[in-house]
Amino acid sequence: MLTPRFARQVFLGRWFMVFASVMILSASGATFIFGMYSKVLKTSLGYDQRTLNTLAFFKDLGYNVGILAGLINEVTPPWIGLSIGAALNMFGYLMIYLAIDGRTARPPVWLMCIYICVGANSQSFTNTCALVTCVKNFPESRGIVLGLLKSFTGLSGAIFAQLYLAIYGDHAKSLVLLIAWLPVAVSILFGHAIRIMPYPRSSPSNSTTSTNRAFYRFLYISIALSGFLLVMIVVQQRISFSHAAYAGSGAAVFLLVFLPLVVVVKQEYKILKEHEESLQEPPTLVVEEPAVLQMVDQEQKTTIETDLEPSSSSSCSPVSCLKHMFSPPARGEDYTILQALVSIDMLLLFLATICGAGGTLTAIDNMGQIGQSLGYPAKTINTFVSLISIWNYAGRIVSGFTSEILLSRYKFPRTLMVTMVLLLSCVGHLLIAFGVPQSLYLASVLVGFCFGALWPLVYAIISEVFGLKYYSTLYNFGTVASPIGAYLLNVRVSGYFYDVEAAKQHGGTLAGVDKTCMGVQCFKKSFLIVTAVTVFGLLVSLVLVWRTRKFYKGDIYARFRDTSASAKVIPAGDSVTDEREPRKEDE
């Protein structure tokens, strides 16, 4: 193992690519810690709460609208997208840091919105390049891959918080500086490893069982990391830490983040041993179908396809392209971008995601004010808000791994899992709407869990139903549902009814300084509407379940496995005979 050759194998192997993706996504949590530096934005630049909420909206808009990132990743290697993301991150957050630190003139609000939107949009590039590449490299384990990698994205906010306290201490301006340079450094260090890497499925170490076993080791490490972060969040809320204590906790987080490298080395060593053992075995001969028959079949297939289908999209006329757009292939085959966007399945999934993600985001973004209106102590509210990232992580892990197990063993459709997640989130919304005493903790668990659980399912369904050829673009189209739902339910519904109730409590006007609303009525109407919208999304998802029921009953990963039934391995020296089953013509 201690040789340059093995080191080169490790750094060029596909498992190091998974580790590199974990590292990049673990440093992509700037949007999840806006609350940690929003107060310094407000005080340094003199913003009111409405202006701060506007900045938060543009942050979410930049993070979720990644169509450009998807299109770029379709035609360029992943390292180009990662480089663009690093440049956007550095520019956006560095300009914000210079503004709040007083090193530049105070920018107008519209310019700050551009800065934070550009900085947050960098994360769509990192997510697309790292996550989509991993899914394409492990297509038969995509549910596990999505759940694992999205879980590290969910934990990234808590990881950022611990590293910030360890490096700079409790100094919010420096947190923005850390956000500006840390993701850039990680992308530079690990970006070269992110690439499409086809591999032979015939090797035992590359089988689906062996691959999933390795991913489970990554899972155990992520559970240990989330458990440590959970403990540190609770303890730091109750005990005052010195800078040395913060440095110690940050070092422990750093080690846990790098621990998956042990799994990488173990897997590559296993591959090396199998290669050495194969060299000691006698050579083998592989008997395949006669090449002439294969050539004739292929020529016949090509001729038929040429006669029946229009010419390639690059040379087709607008009329034929439009006709081709509304003639999609079977589910599971590679759709074009236009075919997927006009598909009824995509529209149903998109609408259900708007309802589900919009409702849970509304609860997450207002959790602090919900706790305040219901009379919870400030320290308890901070704990609720801090722990949402942990429940977010748990939801991503559970939905990704559980849906993959249920699908592979029992043909349980992921679309039905989406329905179950939406149903569970309704319970959390109703607890908030009726202000059930001492129930906000349970509500925060349900909301954070359901928000995290929804996304691996949505991304996996898109890849399974519409194929992987244009997955970079279609993946980012799915994320657009999040800001749409958040704007409709959070800004237009929750914000409106909160202000109306606050005005009633302050003499019918919000002209004064105190705009706080107290009592169950502050969010009751809002979350009854959120619950109704989520139920509507649940019904929409059931329509999608019915439409895709036959698709999920089949073997949707069959074409990604090595099922070469026409080949037979024979030890060298044995006679080679044709043992194919007789064709109908022969019979």
Image (cartoon, rainbow, N blue to C red):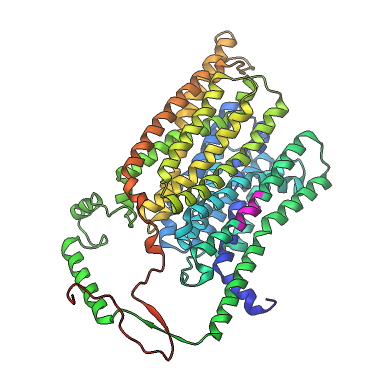
Magenta stretch mostly in which secondary structure? helix
Q: Quadrant of residue 348?
A: top left
Q: Quadrant of the N terminus?
A: bottom right
Report the front residue among 9 and 414: 414
Please say if 234 is above or below 195. above
Residue 159, image x and y in percent? Answer: 67, 47
Of 326 and 561, nearer the camera is 561
Q: Quadrant of residue 74?
A: bottom left
Give the residue displayed 48% in from the left and 51% down from the top.
404
**Quadrant, the C terminus:** bottom left
* Quadrant of the image occupied by residue 13: bottom right
Q: Give the camera-side residue of 87 and 395.
A: 395
> In the image, residue 459 lies at what x, y percent?
45, 48
- Rendered view: 451 above or below 251: above
What is the total number of numbered labels drawn onto the structure image? 0
What's the residue at 24%, 78% (across, down)?
293
306 shown above or below 408: below
Magenta segment boundaries in residue numbering: 217-223
Residue 222 sits inside the magenta stretch: yes
